[in-house]
Image (spheres, rainbow, N blue to C red):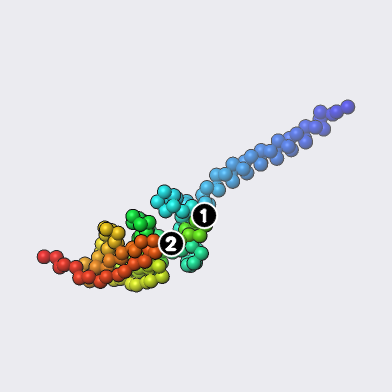
Amino acid sequence: MNNPASEQPSTRRVLWAFSVLCVGLVVALWIAPMRVRPQPPIPRDVWRLEQMFVNEAEVSYSLAGEFYIQFIDELNVVRGHDGCNFFLFRVNQETTSGALRFYGAGQVTLKGCYVLENEGTTRVEIEGFAMVLPYIDKYEFSNEQLILSSFSGNQRFIFSSLGQSAEARVNNLPLPRNP
């Protein structure tokens, strides 16, 4: 014969354990979103890449198709008609680098001009070519050219994409003085 008195403590233990499990699950689900860093939106139709995110842990460049810069504050993308992308990104005054990481379905080819501005200095990298520009005041894009103007230095830097190779040429032209 079954004794109801002997079954009661075991039922209570099961209910107690189930209650503790439910409370723990609710607490875990409440805490978990706080620990996950928010990801930036994925601009699939603009970048035509699978994912874009900011990585605050490391800075590196890989020929396999990954490009990192840390601590991006502002990012603008300009796409030329030939498919050459110009990535303009700005970092804050307290850091020395900014960065992006791109993932592609296969090998990612990074084309275009990467402009990193920090503390009044702009570093431009185009397919491995790098130069430092002082105090860029204005970005302009017209006729397949990225124009970086420095009114303080009375200079204009023109970067022109040359078709599929995404190479560029740099011209240092004087700007007309303001009347």
Question: N-terminal of the two: label 1 or label 2?
Answer: 1
Is residue 95 shown left or right of residue 174?
right
Is residue 26 shown left or right of residue 107?
right
Q: Position of residue 60 (x, y in %)?
A: 48, 67
Q: Secondary structure at mark 2?
A: loop
Q: Cα distance, mark 1 to mark 2? A: 14 Å
Q: Residues within 10 Å of mark 1 (few under 14, many from 20)?
A: few
The residue that appears at 81% across and 28% down in the rendered structure is 4
Q: Give the side of residue 126 with respect to residue 55, left or right.
A: left
Q: Nearer the viewer, residue 32 or 161?
A: 161
Tell me the kind of residue under disc 2.
Leu
The residue that disc 2 covers is 110
- Residue 48 - label: none
- Residue at figure coordinates x 37%, y 59% from the top left: 84
* Amino acid of disc 1: Ala
Asked whether 151 or 38 is in front, the reply is: 151
Disc number placed over residue 105 in the picture, else none:
1
Crowd class of label 2 (few under 14; some 14 to 19; many from 20; radius 10 Å) = some
Q: Is residue 29 above or below residue 72?
A: above
> Which of the 4 quarters of the picture holds residue 70?
bottom left
Q: Position of residue 26 (x, y in %)?
A: 59, 41
